[in-house]
Amino acid sequence: MTVQSKSAARPSSVTTGPIAGSRKIYSSPEGRPDIRVPFREIALDPSAREEPYRAYDCSGPYTDPSIAINLEAGLPPIRAAWIAKRGFDRITPRAVKPRTTAISAPTSWCLAAPRITRSMAAVPASWSPSMNSPAPASSPMR
């Protein structure tokens, strides 16, 4: 987990635009034109004589050349109508308190690598765990 300070600056730009050697396309399930699944169509070398390879594209709208990205405005609420149609109401979010946010967590709460203890150091270097052999008596695994 990365702990960020409250004074961390927000990015003023992000990488956008098409990815070289490929293009972003969308596919819809049969009978559901309202659902658009993004794919990356990757051009193969002409010597392969094969169709472009399609891979699921999780880059969001940032690599779609037809969408204008405005970091200040944020992303459009494309699921708002879908959510409203199901009758969900907006709720008031809970108040943010210092004890409930990771940003204010003291560094002593961060996970650290376990310390090697004397009993762990006593395990012979030649020993390795295996399903067929029990752990030696000096092992911390007992």
Image (cartoon, helix red, strand yellow):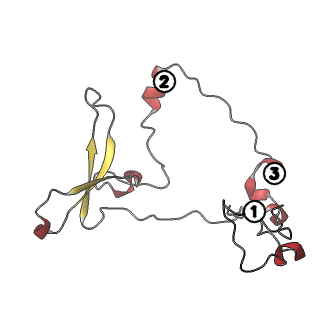
User: Can you identify the residue that label 3 sits on?
Assistant: 98
The numbered disc on residue 104 is none
Observer-side mark, 1 or 3, equals: 1
Q: Position of residue 141 (x, y in %)?
A: 80, 62
Q: Amino acid at mark 3?
A: Pro
User: Can you identify the residue that label 1 sits on?
Assistant: 134
Disc 3 or 2, which lies upstream in sequence? 2
Q: Amino acid at mark 1?
A: Pro
Q: Amino acid at mark 2?
A: Ala
Mark 1 residue crowding within 10 angstroms, few (<14) / some (14–19) / many (20+): few
* Circles 3 and 2 in contact, beta carbons < 8 Å: no
Observer-side mark, 2 or 1, equals: 1
Which quadrant of the figure has residue 118?
A: bottom right
Where the N terminus falls, by quadrant? bottom right
* Circles 2 and 1 in contact, beta carbons < 8 Å: no
User: Can you identify the residue that label 2 sits on?
Assistant: 84
Nearest the eye: 20 or 53: 53
Which quadrant of the figure has residue 94?
A: top right
